[in-house]
Amino acid sequence: MDLLVGQLFTGLSTGSILLLAALGLSLTFGQMGVVNMAHGEFIMAGCYTAYVVQQVVGDAGASLLIALPAGFLVGGAMGLVLEALLIRRLYHRPLDTLLVTFGVGLILQQAARDVFGAPAVNVSVPEALRGGVDLLGVTVPRTRLFIMALAVLSVAAVALVLRFTPAGRRIRAVVGNRDLAETAGISSRAVDAGTFFIGSGLAGVAGVALTLIGSTSPTTGQSYLVDAFLVVVAGGLGRIKGAVVAAVALGALQAVFETYSTASLAKVGVFVVIVVFLQLRPQGLFTLRTRSLA
Amino acid sequence: MPHRFPLPARLARALAASAALTGLLATAACGARAGEETVAAESCLDTSGDTVKVGALNSLSGTMAISETTVRDAIRLAVDELNAAGGVQGKQIEIVAEDGASEPTVFAEKAEKLIREDCVAAVFGGWTSASRKAMLPVFEDNDSLLYYPVQYEGLEASENIFYTGATTNQQIIPALDYLAETGAESLYLVGSDYVFPRTANAIINAYAEAHGIEVLGEDYVTLGSTEFSTIVNQVKSAGADAVFNTLNGDSNVAFFREYANVGLTAADMPVMSVSIAEEEVGGIGVENIEGQLAAWNYYQTLDSPANSAFVEAFKAAYGADRVTSDPMEAAYTSVHLWAATVEKAGSFAVADVQAAADGVSFDGPEGTVVIDGDNHHVTKTARIGEISADGLLYTVWESPAPIEPDPFLEGYDWAADLSVTE
């Protein structure tokens, strides 16, 4: 029983990693409907931002604090460029978008390989985040607690921006009904660019945080991409709330399955559950009620 | 295939039946290709000029580029050395380079291209077992030669492949011997979920049963997975004497960070790894892995004139910050072994090289290696290394003599039932 409770806590920490990786995607894919296969590479760009900042600054603690906003800007800037050059021209052509962004992802991977070399690089963890804390019979690394806190902060920030700022209201208006929003004088083009900037920036932040637990190599982003899409699809498109619940649920599911089998079998189990779940509820956990039916 | 692994009769029949079915399907699926094959065995290798071509087939893109680019560098260095020393049979060697792109199908395609269009005398490369398995039929059908430089799961022998990395009895079994010698009575197995770790763990389980070692857990993650909190907590609560790690690639980074974070150290529960060499230590961060063990046949720190010369030449060619690792050394050695075999045979022709291979030796950085003409593997000294603070590995134990290759583990009674893992 103790182990199970402990595993649920592990699930929470796994879930917060999933959430961090998926949050940006829930904006770009969930809200805008853009299937961005290069999202993983934006995460990877965040990882390398953390690496570069650490090379320049030296101190691991200070560099982490600088890298978080820097990662947001790097990821966001890359998103802006991608949106302006390619995605803007491909709205309403989801299959083309999928292929194009997949190609962009491959180009970014190879670019990282050419600039930083193929072997993984090491981003040191700040002294304060090393080691772990004993909670309910399992040892939870401090890095995971930090990521949990960061995930909560990021979700809160996104929710606040969407709910209370004029920019957030415009985003919600365009998601709710693009044509009507345009009629009301909202530039959907500017809103799209802004949404994509924030979503991609969040991927960059996720990348910086993920250097604390994973590797930083040109293919780092790929390992998070599928999970991120799973979270957004299972959570229901267009709802941040859905992504939060889905991420935690998937993390807990993975952790519990893993207790009774191997990790790779647990992954199969999670996929089976998601497939069955989506059969019963194709729209995901939460749905956005909208009058614009695309 | 000169060696046959003893199979229970029923399994053998089942295998034969499925092999026949596969063959039938393959013939049906590519009838056009099968037609060409009658002429394919005729090599287009031309040795009348001043140069002879060889192929270098490694992944320079995709997920395996992280490891295989370093092997390419080692192959280039060996070829440059041969050329500087007057070439092979008086002919300069020219490399035709191809990118395997981390895709087994691309490996097969490029191998075919190297053999048929570029008419190379031999191909050096491959890393994953999947890439080797994909290339094997190409080399057998075209009767050409592949030199494969990476440690692997054994249970294979082809006339057309020379295996210059370790097979299981030159790496995994010595590692287990070492752990048993140092008092480990229980093990926890962690690996990536594909053929090498599954086969390695089957061997480890059989060994453990025969030697009274308890296996407390066996866990697999999907390739590239970075989620290790559950596994590491289970490892910790199981309290094994040592962990045997067959994870591959990026997963190692997440595993060792998590391992260190929950307070496990090399002193209380050492991890024996078979896929972590000098190249990988940097990415994991030496502070997370210092003191842990690895099983290989070569380390950059080996103290021998041949190794000093190799390391010096490598750094001179590619930069002082570069390190040399076991697969790189095996690739470098494979080029020299090929050259020595050609010199002995007095010919570049595949049949002559195969006939001359038995007993050909090379004094490489890892010591003297000798080709076994029967199974096309080489003798290798097993070495256990400890990862030190400078990011390099230092030998803490080595086999008293080079170990004869035994890819089908025929010399080990306890391994008699292992064929089922294939």
Image (tube, grey):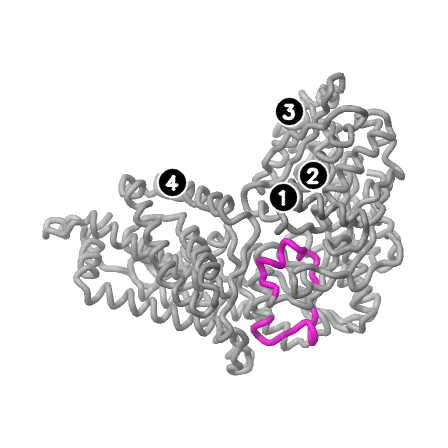
Q: The numbered mark 2 sits on a residue in which chain?
A: B
Assign a secondary structure to mark 1. helix
**Comparing marks 1 and 3, which lies closer to the viewer?**
1
Circle 3 residue? B33
Residue B229: horizontal and vertical position, in percent?
A: 54, 70
Q: Magenta part of the protein: which range? A: B260-286
Relative to the observer, which residue lies in front, B395 or A57? Answer: A57
**Comparing marks 2 and 3, which lies closer to the viewer?**
2
Relative to the observer, which residue lies in front, B35 or B315? Answer: B315
Q: Is residue B159 left or right of residue B321?
A: right
Residue B164: horizontal and vertical position, in percent?
A: 77, 44
Relative to the observer, which residue lies in front, B99 or B24? Answer: B99
Which quadrant holds residue A260?
bottom right
Q: CA distance from mark 2 to mark 1?
A: 9 Å
Circle 2 residue? B77
What amino acid is found at the position of numbered circle 2 in the picture? Answer: Leu
What amino acid is found at the position of numbered circle 4 in the picture? Answer: Val
Q: Which mark is residue A100?
A: 4
Q: The numbered mark 3 sits on a residue in which chain?
A: B
Indicate which disc, 2 or 1, sits on the residue closer to the N terminus.
2
Q: Are marks 2 and 1 in contact (CB under 8 Å)?
A: yes
Q: Do badges 4 and 3 share one subunit? A: no
Residue pictured at 21% horizontal, 66% vertical: A163
The answer to whether residue B272 is magenta is yes
